[in-house]
Image (tube, helix red, strand yellow):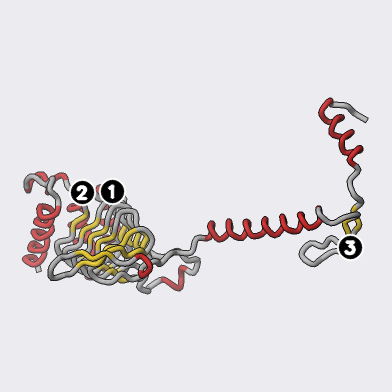
C-alpha cells in the first residue's frame, strides 16, 4: 500500500518535468508548485474518504484550497500522472473522474449544470468524466455528466456541455474544430457545418422577441397613421372596446409646442 502510494507520488512529480518547461529541479518543484501540492493533498483526502473516515477528508480539501487556490472535492477520482499548471481557481467536483496523463490549466471548472432541483442530484453522477491524455485550457468550463474522450484538447475559455469524441479539439461552445489521428498525430480540420452545437441564449431570444414585437407595433402604427379620417376600432391584443380618436388639430398642436418652448402657462 505504502509503496504504491509512493510510486504514484513520484509519477506526479515526474509529470511536472514532462509538461512544464519552467520546472528546474526537484527541490523547487516540491517546494513551490501549488498544482503538485494540490494533487498530493487530494490523494490523501481521497484515500481517507474511501476508507470511511468522516470529516477529515473535507478538512484536508478545505486546507488544500486555502494553501493552493485549487478546490478538489475528496470524492473526485483522479488518475496517474495528473498535472495542474499554475492552478489558481481550478474547481473539480465530487463525481468528476479524470483519467491518466491529464493536464488542467488555471481557472478550469469540472462542475455541474445549474438546477433548482438539488435534492434530485444528490448521490448521482453530475460532473464530467475525462479520458486519458486530456488537456483542458485556461478558464474552460466543463459542465454536467459528460464524457470527454481520450486525447481531447479543450481550448482556453471553452464551455463544454456535451460529450466530445476522442482525439478532437473543441473550442468556444461545444464546437469541435479538428480531429487528430492517434497513430500519426496528423490533424484534420472538421467542416464547420458538422460541428455547430450551441447553447440556448436567453438574452438573444429575448432581444429577438422584442425586435419582432417592435416591428409588429410599427406596422400597426403605420396602418393607423395612413388611414384617412378618424381612427376607429383600435384593439390591443384582441381586447378592449372600439374607440374613436379624432384627427389631430395642427393649429392647436403648434400653439402647444410654442407655449412649451417659451415656458408660457395657461
Residue designated by label 2: 34
Residue 249 x, y percent position in the rendering: 91, 43
Residue found at x 8% / y 59%: 10
Q: How far apart are marks 2 and 3 (CA)?
A: 74 Å
Q: Nearer the viewer, mark 2 or mark 3?
A: 3
Nearer-N-terminus badge (2/1): 2
**For the residue labelled by badge 2, is the local secondary structure a helix, a strand or a loop?**
helix
Can residue 47 be spotted in the picture?
Answer: no
Instruction: Judge by depth and name the residue closer to the eye, 57 or 29.
Output: 29
Label 3 environment density (alpha carbons within 10 Å; few <14, some 14–19, many ≥20): few
Q: Is label 2 in contact with label 1 (beta carbons under 8 Å)? A: yes
Label 1 crowding class (10 Å Cα cut-off): few <14, some 14-19, many 20+? some
Q: Quadrant of residue 51 in the image?
A: bottom left
Instruction: Indicate the quadrant containing the C terminus: top left, top right, bottom left or bottom right.
Output: top right
Give the image quarter of residue 215.
Answer: bottom right
Q: Mark 3 points at which residue?
A: 242
Residue 88, which numbered label? 1
Q: Is mark 1 on a helix, strand or loop?
A: loop
Residue appearing at x 22%, y 64% in the figure: 134
Q: Horizontal and vertical percent for residue 24?
A: 8, 44
Tell me the residue at 25%/47% (across/down). Answer: 67
Amino acid at each position: 500500500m505504502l509503496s504504491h502510494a509512493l510510486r504514484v507520488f513520484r509519477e506526479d512529480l515526474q509529470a511536472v518535468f514532462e509538461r512544464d518547461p519552467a520546472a528546474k529541479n526537484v527541490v523547487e518543484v516540491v517546494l513551490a508548485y501549488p498544482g503538485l501540492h494540490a494533487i498530493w493533498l487530494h490523494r490523501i483526502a481521497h484515500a481517507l474518504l474511501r476508507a470511511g473516515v468522516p470529516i477529515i477528508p473535507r478538512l484536508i480539501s478545505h486546507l488544500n484550497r486555502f494553501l493552493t487556490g485549487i478546490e478538489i472535492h475528496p470524492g473526485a477520482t483522479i488518475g496517474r500522472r495528473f498535472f495542474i499548471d499554475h492552478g489558481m481557481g481550478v474547481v473539480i467536483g465530487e463525481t468528476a473522474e479524470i483519467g491518466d496523463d491529464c493536464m488542467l490549466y488555471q481557472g478550469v471548472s469540472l462542475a455541474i449544470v445549474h438546477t433548482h432541483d438539488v435534492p434530485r442530484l444528490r448521490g448521482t453522477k453530475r460532473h464530467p468524466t475525462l479520458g486519458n491524455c486530456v488537456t483542458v485550457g485556461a478558464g474552460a468550463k466543463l459542465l454536467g455528466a459528460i464524457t470527454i474522450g481520450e486525447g481531447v484538447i479543450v481550448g482556453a475559455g471553452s464551455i463544454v456541455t456535451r460529450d466530445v469524441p476522442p482525439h478532437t479539439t473543441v473550442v468556444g461552445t461545444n464546437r469541435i474544430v479538428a480531429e487528430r489521428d492517434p497513430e500519426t498525430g496528423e490533424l484534420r480540420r472538421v467542416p464547420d457545418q458538422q460541428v455547430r452545437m450551441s447553447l440556448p441564449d436567453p438574452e438573444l431570444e429575448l432581444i429577438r422577441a422584442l425586435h419582432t414585437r417592435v416591428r409588429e407595433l410599427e406596422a400597426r402604427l403605420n396602418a393607423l397613421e395612413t388611414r384617412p379620417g378618424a381612427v376607429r376600432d383600435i384593439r390591443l391584443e384582441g381586447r378592449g372596446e372600439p374607440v374613436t380618436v379624432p384627427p389631430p388639430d395642427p393649429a392647436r398642436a403648434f400653439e402647444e409646442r410654442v407655449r412649451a418652448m417659451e415656458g408660457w402657462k395657461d
